Amino acid sequence: MWPFGRATVFIRSRFLETDSVGELPVGRRLPLIRHELFHVQQGQEWGFLSYWVKQLSARLRHLSISARESSVEAPAYEAQHTAHAALDETGIPR
């Protein structure tokens, strides 16, 4: 979440690739996208500065870059797990 209402989502590969017809990927990447979009939502609700203060303090408090158990990351991982559970065995949403 950046100032002035703009959000940028970073994915491990650093790029969110589209398929051959320009559509966003579904399937196995969907849970990760849901996790990151949850952070966008947090930033919109809390505001830019508050979001980043909470992110940084969570990492310092947990001495971890992921801080999975923090109040910032735990709900995002829950959203990711919920999205994962909604996929069938082939990675397509049910």
Image (cartoon, helix red, strand yellow):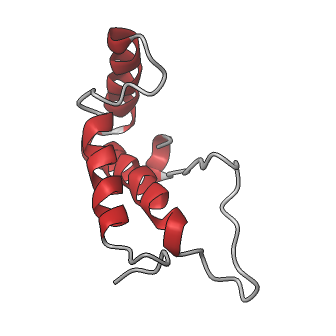
Rendered image quadrant of residue 42: top left
- Seen in the picture, residue 92 relative to 75 is either above or below; the reply is below
Coordinates of residue 66 in the picture (x, y in percent): 44, 28
Q: Would you say 39 lies left or right of 22 here?
A: left
60 or 92: nearer the eye?
92
Coordinates of residue 3 in the picture (x, y in percent): 48, 41
Rendered image quadrant of residue 85: bottom left
Residue at horizontal 27 percent and vertical 37 percent from the top:
74
Residue at horizontal 40 percent and vertical 60 percent from the top:
34
Rendered image quadrant of residue 62: top left
Q: Would you say 25 lies left or right of 43 here?
A: right
Check the image and name the residue furthest to the bottom. Answer: 21
- Seen in the picture, residue 35 relative to 57 is either above or below; the reply is below
Residue at horizontal 43 percent and vertical 60 percent from the top:
31
Coordinates of residue 22 in the picture (x, y in percent): 70, 83
* Total tally of numbered discs in the picture: 0
Coordinates of residue 8 in the picture (x, y in percent): 55, 50
31 or 11: nearer the eye?
31
- Seen in the picture, residue 53 relative to 18 is either above or below; the reply is above
31 or 46: nearer the eye?
31
Residue at horizontal 39 percent and vertical 80 percent from the top:
93
